Amino acid sequence: MAAAAAGGSRGVRRPVLLTPRGNGDRTVFLFDRRQEQADPDEKVLSYGKDNYRGFRSAVCQAFGIATDENFVITTTNRKEITEDNFSELVQDGVTLYLLQSVDQTLLSATKERIDFLPHYDTLVKSGMYEYYASEGQNPLPFALAELIDNSLSATSQNTGIRSIQIKLLFDDSQGKPAVAVIDNGRGMTSKQLNNWAVYRLSKFTRQGDFESDHSGYVRPLPVPRSLNSDISYFGVGGKQAVFFVGQSARMISKPADSQDVHELVLSKEDFEKKEKNKEAIYSGYIRNRKPSDSTHITSDDERFLHNLILEERDKDSFTAVVITGVQPDHMQYLKNYFHLWTRQLAHIYHYYIHGPKGNETNAVTKDVTPFNNIDIQISMFEKGKVPKIVNLREIKDDMQTLYINTAADSFEFKAHVDGEGIVEGIIRYHPFLYDRETYPDDPCFPSKLNEDDDDDEDCFIVEKGARGKRPIFECFWNGRLIPYTTVEDFDWCAPPKKRGLAPVECYNRISGALFTNDKFQVSTNKLTFMDLELKLKDKNTLFTRIFNGQEQRMKIDREFALWLKDCHEKYDKQIKFTVFKGVTTRTDLPSKRMQSPWTMYAAIEWDGKTYKTGQLVKTVKTLPIFYGSIEKFFLYGDHDGDIYATGGEVQIALEPQALYAEMKTIPISKLDRTVSDKAVKKYIEDEMARLPDKLSVTWPEGDELLPNETRFAGTPIGALRIVILNKKGEAMQKLPGTSHGGSKKLLVELKVILHSPTGNKEIISHISQHGGKWPYWFKKMENLQKLGNYTLKLQVVLNESNADTYAGRPLPSKIFKFTIIEGKPEKFSVGLLELPFRVGVPFNIPLELQDEFGHATQLSNDIKPILEASGLTLQYEEITAGTKCFIKGVTAKGCVNSCQGKNFNLKVTLPGLKEDTQIFKIRLQPGPPCQLRVKPDSEILKIENGTAFPFQVEVLDESGNITAQPKLIVHCKFSGASNLPVYSVDCSNGGTNILTGPVIQVQNIKKDQMLKARIEILSCKDVPPVEKIIKLLPSSHVARLQVLSMDGQKAIQIKHQDEINWIAGDIMRNLIFQMYDEGEREINITPPVAEKIKVNWTPRINKEQLIQGLLPDVKVPTSVKDVRYCLITYLDDHVSLESAFTVRPLPDEPKHIKCKLKGPNTLQMGEELEGEVDVMITDQYGNQVQTVTSACVNSLGVSGPGLDKSNLKITWQESTLTMRVKGIRFKPCLLGSKELCFAWREFSDFLRVTLTAGSPAKLRFVDWPELEKPVAVINGRELQKPLIVQLCDQWGNPSPEPNVKISLTRSSNLKIVPSNLQPKTDENGRANLGVISIHAPRGEHTLQLKASYNKTTLDCPVITLNVLPDPEKPVCLNVKYDKNACFPAGGTFPDFMVSVLSEDDNIIKNINAARISMKMWEVQSSGTGIPIDVTTFSCSKVKDDKEDGFFYFRDKVIPERVGTYCIQFTFAMDKTNMLISEQIVVEVVPNDPVRLLPDSSPATPAVSNVRALTSRTLVRDLHLHVMDQYNNHTGIDLVGRIIAKIKSPNEDDTEIPQFQGKVSTTEFPFDRGSAKINLVLAENSPGRDSTEYILLFEPDLPGLTQPLEPYRLSFMFYNDFKKQQQMATLTRERDQLSQSIGVYRNWFDTTNQLVTEIKCQVKEAETRETQLKDELKKHQIELPQTNTLQYVDSLIKQKMLDQEGVMKQPRRTCTLPNYPKGNQDILGKIAHLAQIEDNEAAKVISWHLASDMDCVVTLTTEAARSIFDETQGRQQVLPLDSIYKKTLPDWNRPLPHLRNGKICFRPIGNPVFARDLLTFPDNVEHCQTVFGMLLGDTIIIDNLDAANHYRKEVVKITHCPTLLTREGDRIRSNGKFGGLQNKAPPMDKLRGMVFGAPMPKLYSTFSGQIDLLQQYRTAVVKLDNVNKDLDLHLQSLNTPEVQKKKEELAKQEKSLKLIEQKLGMTSSDNQMRITEPLLQPVMLDMSDTPIPPKRMRRETVKKLYSSEEWISSPTKKQLQQQPQQQPQQQPQQQTLQMSSSELNGTPRKRKA
């Protein structure tokens, strides 16, 4: 672009060069404007020299100017060209003027050529932000704001009014629409205007040849709110804004010191024209002209410019931006939303317009500020309308004005960010006033629903608070709003998680603003901050509060909380809820979420008034207005006791309750706070007087119903007219009008109720309403017909609801009672008849008489019935009258034809009734039996012996009808012979039947015989019997059967049960039979007779042969053991005959041999068969032939595969007639079934035996790899497979020998687990040693198996194991530290860097730091063991994540006592095993010297100035030592002196005692850290009697850099020896008491501190227990109040069982064996790195990656190479350090159809990145790298159609990656699909190479619950323990011994005070205060302070106790025991027992 602009034409017409151009020449454009008639065009001069004189000559020559003529050459900015500035100003392409003088008026306009190539920042910063991202708002106001920014910067130096005008010129008569922004700023020179046109030329880059209004930029001085007007910044916004608003911009500007106006036009049309003509786009002209010259404006579209240019004459400097070609939608927005966007601008520039404090409209006086002079005015001109003019200062409803003026108080603060970034902030509080929030509403963020909603069911609960979802802070940059950036909150002003000082809703009543300086980056269009919130929330950002204009450093969170609390208490006018009544659930609310909990209260305090239950109130803003009494108050939430709240609800009972009896619940805010009780009561009384009271009833049409009247059915009741009267007797039609919903109409309801035995029944119900012209009226009732007691009720009811009560009171009613009875009979019906009807049997006919309505009535006596029926004769006895009427004794006779009877129509007539006849059907059945009829009719009957005779019998009634009845049995008895049967038959059903029975059989009958038969009905004696004569004939049936065998012509009889011998397998033929009857007559065999003959030896019988008398042939059995039983039977209806014989078989000739094995058929390889084989000779049927002899042995042969015949023996067995074979065995061959062949003569037989393995001889492994190579195993891990061994014989065959013991032998350094392996073989000879773990040093080891069988050692294999080190097993701790460091007491240790090394000497990573600790103890001289009181330190936080695997112990405190200490580091491998490091012995040396102290505090000397030396001795043998701050001896190498002197506590005292020799000072040598002191006063030394003096020992040690504190010793001086002696005694007593008191105080202080610490522990334990309990509640786990531990234990057990059940559920697993992780750099095979839940996705992704699934991933190339070498290159490997990670896909990248947050099209098929379906159990970051490379952007989608649709749409906008479908199809990234290579096979075809499924989510849920339960159990146990400790300590403080100690202490303190008064000394309390740091810990009063965090408490305790922090057990016991001694009795002993270091605090055990 730059080249084009430079090389292209510079304008429309290119002038010709006046001089030829050479290399290095510069081209200059010249305008001659000395005179008006000069040439208006420019001239071009090419000039190469670099001096002004030559240039001026060239100009004179070019323009024909005389060399002596006077003129000047200037730039367009009117700078004169001189010799000095020639090189600087005259550059290539510059435009110059020829003028008469520098300030000459420009006589005609000129065109200055400019280039405005975009600055290179266009490329550098082009991606900072999308310009004008709308964020849901119209960005047009923000575009105008860019132009206002420029104007504010331009006017920043104005001393007067800073005027900025925005003119919207929408008057069509003046040209096309335009927008003009005009300011009275400093204006721009032509060069500055040129710079403005250069895109992205910011004020910081405008240097060198870029002249600018910001040239030499200097940052403004800090001002409040950064209101420095320095907001025209980047060189971007102005250009973007003008071309956003319109399509052309005209820049007109005049600087203050210039005569010329500069004008530049940029337009889209011009750019497009230049591009079309291939001209330089970024070049053009600046028109330089005189002010008010508009001659160049010729277009009618820009007529308005004449007026704008005309205004220039009165302006000293200005800039105008005129935008034309305004977008139509922008113009409509500016017109239609004028108020909205001007309000937005007032918001943006609020603080520039109104000053740092903003627009305080409520302020009484306003400060005069420099910002009052900014005047931003907006005017809009439209044709035919009055111009709209608004000044932004006048807008009162911009958001900042609303925020400022609704705030009650403010909180100012300042934030200091790294660098020079400063943010001023203000938070304002908008209080809650009575019934509403005062937080202002923002149209862009509506905070809540309209508060004026009058729905009385509204719930007054503001869930989101006053602010709603709006953030707290708006952000201003250099005082100007950055609209699209807000800050939600900071940690210190966000609503707290726990209840703070102020209610949480107060946090939603704050608004705020942040004011930053320009050290924070904003986008070029000033819409968004780049990094503000990030910097503010950085941990290094410092917040301070601004109070009264002063910056105060304090805890900002505490200050803010206190301020918010103060605002809440001072400004919120809230409601106080009092008299707590409990918590309830409100079912009246529709939302279940809001139904509970609601807290109930009985009273509130509101706006200075108290409202309580029962108080009368009135409502406002409800429809209708309610009057009532308060029932209760509701407040949402679970509260307890009195509370303040912003709202709530009140339940009122509407009054008068007699009228309404209704409850209403309304917001409390709708109570009328101004109404009086008197007004409410008057309203209630008025309402009560207007209620309805009674009814008036009249009968206008007669038929009046009288009370208790009796009426016939059907009598009508007349019409009714009703009037409702109130208490005043006034008629009324509706309830009196009320204030809620108008009056309700009254209706009258009429009901007629029948009182029946089953209950009251409503039979008539009508409702009448009152009209305008008719009263309440009911019509005549004529339908009352039912009999009974009635009630007619008139009831007043309410319209709509039909309620007969109102407000709990019944409405008026009236009741009439009456009775209805039956009328005269009009008709009748026949009642229920008693069945059955029989001929001649009487029956009754019941009659039912009714009146006309069907009511039962009585029959009169004069009516006689008439009975008629066709075919019957009828007659009756009588008829009964009364309520129950019967025709009695009716009989019928006639023929009915059958036992079932016959139907007849019976007609009954009652003469005289209206309906007098009834016809009904009856069924008449036969009557009772009267006679018996028997057929056949003849008297004598003939039958054959052995047959039965049938009789036909019929039972008849008196009319001859066949009849039947129950138990109608007919009997027949025979007589005339013995044993005759009796016949009987049942005729109960049909009255007729066949009478028969058993046959009549008389034995040995040879001739006819006569019998008699008697037939009768035994149950009917009145029916006469019938007799018959029977003649019995002999039988002609078969009686005997005979069998014969024909031998030729001879017949041999076969008798019954004969036995016959016959050859086995032969056939018996020629069997015949004969049959005879009772008379011995032979019976001819006929076909029917033949049918009844059966034989048992054949199922098929030849009937023709049977007829001829021949039986079938008998087949003899083939086995001699089988005997055939032959049976012939004859069976007919009369007789059963049989004849039987037996056939026994005999053996036949030899035909076979048969082998039988005696004993087992199994033999081992190499052994003989135990059993013997017997060979037997048989006939063809297997029957042993008895005729063979021993000679047959020679003919037997034996053969078989592998048979060894060397020991074969064959013998004859005479007893069994068999041959016996022994010695069968086999040569080595295949095991299994073997077939042996036995042959005799031509006969053979086969025998099968099983050959098994021989005796066990060796052991072999089953399914184990080659044992020639060593088996690789990681130390401590299990072998790949279980060890299974098999017993084998010497030929290698598996030997199934059970219970053979097998043992393992190994080298001593090889350990296996389980170690005691001695398995035995099973029934198959196998033994499973299981999967064993190997523990051994690195290298090869052997495992030898041993076994023996029958005391013979077997050949056993040996396994060679290659043991690899375990990369995950910790074996040692590596500790690094500065070994040259010194360890001064009380200092800090150097940093210890600890790492855990594995067996392969690599550092183990991913270790929990809590498992590593540092222990320290002091080395005791007595022994080397670790003492009990060990100090433990925990690990410090890791500073650098890159140092993974290293654990630091930083800033650990060195013990304060000098000595030898031992340090050891431990790593907890599990709950029982610890890994310890080597002990580090350190020598703690003294610290720097700080003080001078004696060995022990000497007694206070009491001396006098007498002669005796002992009385003058001050100190004797006092050794002073140099000590560090922890009282360790130091300064061994110091040499110097100690100077002793005496001082008086009173500085005015001049009488000072002197030392011996009358000297004031004396010196003592100091060597090796100490000095020995002996001091004596001079005899007769001066000094005041009984006065206390101070002995001062000052060290003078040149080797010290810091001087030491002197040692002071008080002494008493006396002039009198006797007094001195007395006082010396008192002094000794005083010292002893002081020491004793010190011991007591020390003990009590230590005990109190211990109790305080335990209380802190109790509080912490309670907090922890509560937190965990709440956390368990979130998991729906409720815990009981009692037996908690047992319940938790059972719950943990149950959860673990549930978890185990989930874990055992079948899941998809990868069966591909993983590579052993012998190195921590090995991640494993790809198939094992990820898991996929969805089955379909798992299948298709596994198939897609099938070639990579077996690949092993390593972290390093070295590890990959190692695997490659181990597997001889067979294993795929992938090292991660060789992956180019910049090409990996962004894991969070959206799908291709999502572009810039927008959806380009609606996909189908649920697309998702394949990588998003993966879950990684371990090494997530590495796995993302692996699968990011393998899968890339591969997408999973439902099916092929969806995939094709998705790809077709994606390729329209970008590249489409590979698509996989859940159905198994693949579309490659090049679009190819189809074929077998793009179709996934079924899951089972993948051979286990499939990604496993992750553990179900329920498993992790159970894990979390178990972890929480275990934590809770620990917390409960800990809480119980610390509570017990606390109780124990508190009890110990109340023991009599402790009380006694307190009394002794008080007594000793009192004694000490008396002694000191006698001595006249300073109180020991003061001295103890002075020396307190040396004697005892400082106790803090912690009773009122909150419990400090544990770290703070530890620090506090560290200060409270001595230099050694925590009390060790022995010393603690010593302290507890010491005060029990009697101080008075043993003061000296106590002093000796406790050293000075112990007085300073006993040795403590330090905690990290």
Image: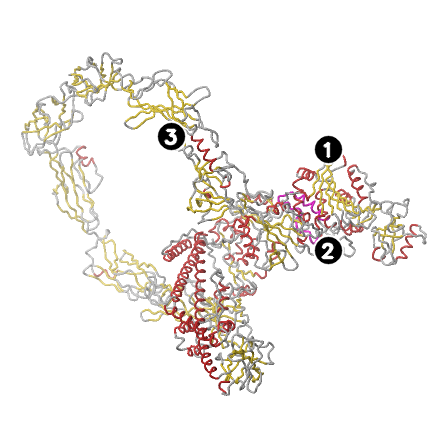
Mark 1 touches mark 3? (CB < 8 Å): no
Q: CA distance from mark 1 to mark 2?
A: 47 Å
Stretch in magenta: 123-150
Q: Secondary structure at mark 2?
A: loop
Q: Is residue 1495 above or below residue 1097?
A: below
Q: Which mark is residue 204?
A: 2
Query: Looking at this view, is 1548 or 111 the one in front?
Result: 1548
- Say which residue appears at 10% left-offset and 21% top-offset: 938
Q: Amino acid at mark 3?
A: Pro
Q: Secondary structure at mark 1?
A: loop
Identify the residue under disc 3.
810
Tell me the quarter of the picture where residue 1591 sits. bottom right
Q: Position of residue 553 (x, y in %)?
A: 59, 60
Q: Amino acid at mark 1?
A: Gly
Q: Which mark is residue 1601?
A: none
Which comes before the other along the chain, label 1 or label 2? 2
Mark 1 touches mark 2? (CB < 8 Å): no
Q: Position of 582 compared to 415: left or right?
A: left
